């Protein structure tokens, strides 16, 4: 591993909250801060204290956090036109936030100077100078975000560079080139970075990219290759419009592929876990296709792929999944081949080989079930239960003796209400429970867990994470069979189960039953 360091600034709590649907409570913001500190990013851009009372209250409470790896910085803009820096209330609030660093953005594009700020180019430079100089007297680290730099450099290179020169001379410690509109391409980003470094050798240069062309990571890598040592992004990748550089995908590339040190030694394997934690706090479903840490990042389905990766993982995996806290998934399907099934069975019974009768039986059963509409490639937990049954290792921990689900839609009611009743048998004891929910599946889930929690207290931690329904043969109209996929979590891990039936409630019940069984046996 190289000793080259790349400093990471996470802006989830500032730029990230500008993404549609992203809202953090005060407690959420504190929890995200702790997660980012655990990961080990150098800086956390925690918000704009002048924009809302919640951010100011956050900075007050954050001062009591015992951060180990990260430093907080507050974010704001250059002084208002026609106002002295010391008289600008927003700059005062930046200082009152009490953070070790301050991030200030200013205009680099003459179009914005003229049409947005509506000031002269000289006044814009004065705003940059006076703001940075004022803040530098009170704070040890001033990070200057050159907003719209790449667009400004393309339109008027000399003026864009003059804004950088002004910020440096005023005392900025780090200069960040921002692709605010997300429209630059990697070759243009690299070229601009080269020119800035050539014009101002020795400066600490950063990159802040947006993903409007799907190139945020590519542009960031291009900038780092040219000499940027300070990188902005959001861990999950959300942010305004199409989002920001997804640090969870970028950091592994920088560390594992390019030899840069972004996180404290040994922290990279936690990036998947902590990214999922931040996504959970933000109430965002993490994309299964997210590079490195997504559920599908190391999934193999094709028979030749599965056979190859079992013989030598390098054949179809670009890194070891464990390096980023992920795991290999061999998907169970009729195209997956016998090798994938053998690997799954060996996790339960290592003595099983490719020619064992259980493998032959499972292959045939899998093909038959998939022909009926079952699909196990996204339901590993249900497949493990199927394996245990075939091995004779399955003993039901409970039986659903009967259940009933009713949905009512009273006239004038804004919310439909569903009620579920369930009777279960655990050993020689019966338990009956009822619950209500917004929908029938939710009500059934609550009733089932209520009936079983007295026997298995750990079920209190389990909840549904995702619920999908797929009509298997639409030509059969309302008589069509449906496949239900349920993802469940206990707050630490996730697992998926499947159910198939012409009755959507029966299919859901089968998936719920598998979900609870898996949690109890695993």
Image (cartoon, helix red, strand yellow):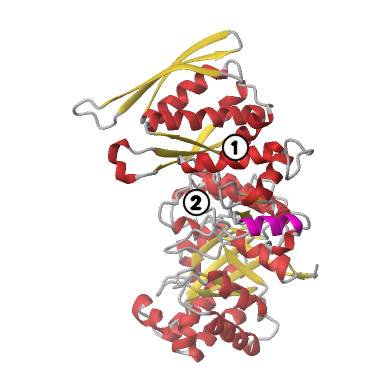
Give the residue number, with chain letter if any, for mark 2: 55
Q: Earlier in the sequence, mark 2 or mark 1?
A: 2
Magenta segment range? 303-311
- Does dot 2 land on a helix, a strand or a loop? helix
Relative to 258, residue 272 above or below: above
Question: In the rendered image, which quarter is residue 318 located in?
Answer: bottom right
Assess disc 2: are there few (<14), some (14-19) or many (≥20) residues with their C-alpha within 10 Å of its C-alpha: many
Q: Is residue 113 left or right of residue 338?
A: left
User: 490 or 65: which is nearer to us?
Assistant: 490
Reading the image, the residue beneath label 1 is 381
Residue 259 located left or right of residue 63: right
- Can you tell which of label 2 and label 1 is closer to the viewer? 1
Q: Please report contact status of discs 2 and 1: CB closer than 8 Å, yes or no.
A: no
Q: Is residue 384 magenta?
A: no
Residue at 48%, 29% (x, y): give it: 510
Q: Percent x, y for residue 9?
A: 62, 63
- Residue under the image location 53 percent in, 55 percent down: 13
- Residue 423 - label: none
Q: Secondary structure at mark 1?
A: helix
Nearest the viewer among 216 and 488 is: 488
Residue 383 sits above or below residue 220 on the image: above
Q: Where in the figure is residue 458, as x and y percent of width and height? A: 62, 25
Q: Position of residue 109 (x, y in %)?
A: 44, 82
Main SS, magenta region, reads helix
Give the position of the N terminus as an image quadrant: bottom right
């Amino acid at each position: 591993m190289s000793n080259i360091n790349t400093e990471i600034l996470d802006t989830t709590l500032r730029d990230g909250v500008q993404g549609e649907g992203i809202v953090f409570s005060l407690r959420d913001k504190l929890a995200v801060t702790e997660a980012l500190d655990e990961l080990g990013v150098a800086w956390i851009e925690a918000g704009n204290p002048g924009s809302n009372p919640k951010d100011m209250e956050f900075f007050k409470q954050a001062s009591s956090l015992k951060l180990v790896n990260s430093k907080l910085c507050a974010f704001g803009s250059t002084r208002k036109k026609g106002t002295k820096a010391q008289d600008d209330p927003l700059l005062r609030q930046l200082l009152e936030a009490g953070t070790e660093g301050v991030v200030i953005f200013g205009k680099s594009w003459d179009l914005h100077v003229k049409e947005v700020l509506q000031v002269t180019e000289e006044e814009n430079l004065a705003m940059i100078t006076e703001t940075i100089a004022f803040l530098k007297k009170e704070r040890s680290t001033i990070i200057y975000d050159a907003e719209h730099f790449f667009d400004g450099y393309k339109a008027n290179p000399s003026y864009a560079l003059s804004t950088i020169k002004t910020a440096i001379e005023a005392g900025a410690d780090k200069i960040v080139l921002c692709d605010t509109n997300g429209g630059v391409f990697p070759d243009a980003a690299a070229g601009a970075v080269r020119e800035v470094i050539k014009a101002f050798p020795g400066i600490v240069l950063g990159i802040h990219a947006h993903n409007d062309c799907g190139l945020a990571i590519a542009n960031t890598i291009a900038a780092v290759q040219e000499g940027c040592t300070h990188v902005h992004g959001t861990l999950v990748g959300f942010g305004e419009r199409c989002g920001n550089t997804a640090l969870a995908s970028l950091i592994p590339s920088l560390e594992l592929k390019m030899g840069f040190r972004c996180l404290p030694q040994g922290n990279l394997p936690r990036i998947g876990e902590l990214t999922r934690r931040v996504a959970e706090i933000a109430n965002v479903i993490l994309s299964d296709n997210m590079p490195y840490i997504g559920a599908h990042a190391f999934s193999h389905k094709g028979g030749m792929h599965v056979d190859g990766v079992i013989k030598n993982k390098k054949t179809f995996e670009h890194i070891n999944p464990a390096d980023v806290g992920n795991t290999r998934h061999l998907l169970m399907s009729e195209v997956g081949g016998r090798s994938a099934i053998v690997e799954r069975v060996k996790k339960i019974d290592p003595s099983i080989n490719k020619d064992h009768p259980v493998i032959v039986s499972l292959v045939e059963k899998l093909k038959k079930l998939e022909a009926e509409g079952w699909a196990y490639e996204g339901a590993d937990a249900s497949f493990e239960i199927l394996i245990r049954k075939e091995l004779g290792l399955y003993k039901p921990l409970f039986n659903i003796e009967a259940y009933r689900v009713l949905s009512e839609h009273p006239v004038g009611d804004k919310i439909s209400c569903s009620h579920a009743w369930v009777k279960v048998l655990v050993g020689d004891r019966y338990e009956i429970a009822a619950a209500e929910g917004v929908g029938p599946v939710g009500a059934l889930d609550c009733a089932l867990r209520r009936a079983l929690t007295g026997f298995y207290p750990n079920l209190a931690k389990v909840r549904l994470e995702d619920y999908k329904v797929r009509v298997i043969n639409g030509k059969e109209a309302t008589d069509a069979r449906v496949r239900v996929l349920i993802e469940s979590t206990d707050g630490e891990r996730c697992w998926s189960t499947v159910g198939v039936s012409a009755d959507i409630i029966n299919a859901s019940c089968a998936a719920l039953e598998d979900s609870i069984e898996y949690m109890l046996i695993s």
